[in-house]
Image: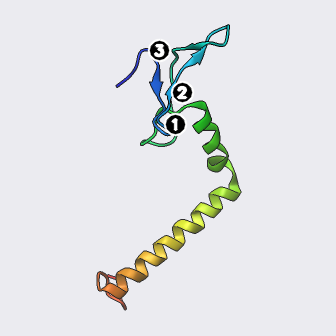
Amino acid sequence: MQLDREEPWRCTSCGELMYNLDAKGYPRSGAPMPHFWSLEHNEVCSACYFMVLPLATNEYWKALHAAYEEAEQQRKDKNDRLTGRRDYFTAF
């Protein structure tokens, strides 16, 4: 559901109700950030966006996540072979 630009909205990541501020600093309705790199969380507030941005753009964190995903895949493969879901010798 697309909200009108003048309506308040909820961040799809943290769930908080979001408003912009007017010239005097009082809450005022506003539009969400239009795009995010997650399909699950497609409209996020600035706080959620800027918390995730360093994790998604920093090479150190990307390498750490890639290593984690590889370890998880190896663990799953080993578990499948030990439980008989995949043949132990041929991996099929």
Which label number is shown at residue 33? Answer: 2
The amino acid sitting under disc 3 is Arg
Residue under the point 58% across and 63% down: 66
Residue 48 shown left or right of residue 74 in the figure: right
> Residue at horizontal 66%, vertical 57%?
61
Q: Are marks 3 and 2 in contact (CB under 8 Å)?
A: no
Q: From the viewer's perspective, is the residue at label 3 or at label 1 nearer?
A: 3
The disc placed on residue 5 is 3
Among numbered discs 3 and 1, the one appearing first in the sequence = 3
Which mark is drawn over residue 72?
A: none
Residue shown at the point (36%, 87%) measured from the top left: 82
Mark 1 and mark 2 in contact (Cβ < 8 Å)? Answer: yes
- Distance from disc 3 to disc 1, alpha carbons, whole Å, reads 17 Å
Vertical order, 47 against 22 (above or below): below
Tag 3 secondary structure: loop
Q: CA distance from mark 3 to mark 2?
A: 11 Å
Pointer 1: residues within 10 angstroms few (<14), some, or many (20+)?
few
Dot 3, crowdedness within 10 Å: few (<14), some or many (≥20)?
few
Find residue 47 and report its horizontal and vertical position in percent.
Answer: 61, 35
Q: Earlier in the sequence, mark 3 or mark 2?
A: 3
Above or below for 22 versus 48: above
Please name the amino acid that badge 2 sits on. Met
Query: Which of the 4 image quarters holds residue 50?
Result: top right
- Identify residue for label 1: 36
Which residue extends farthest front? 26
In the rendered image of this protein, does residue 77 appear above or below residue 63? below
Q: Quadrant of residue 45?
A: top right
In the picture, which quadrant includes the N terminus? Answer: top left
Q: Name the colour scheme.
A: rainbow
Mark 2 neighbour class, 10 Å CA radius: few under 14, some 14 to 19, many 20 or more: few
Which residue in the rendered view is the most extreme toward the left?
Answer: 85
Q: Position of residue 84 (x, y in %)?
A: 29, 86
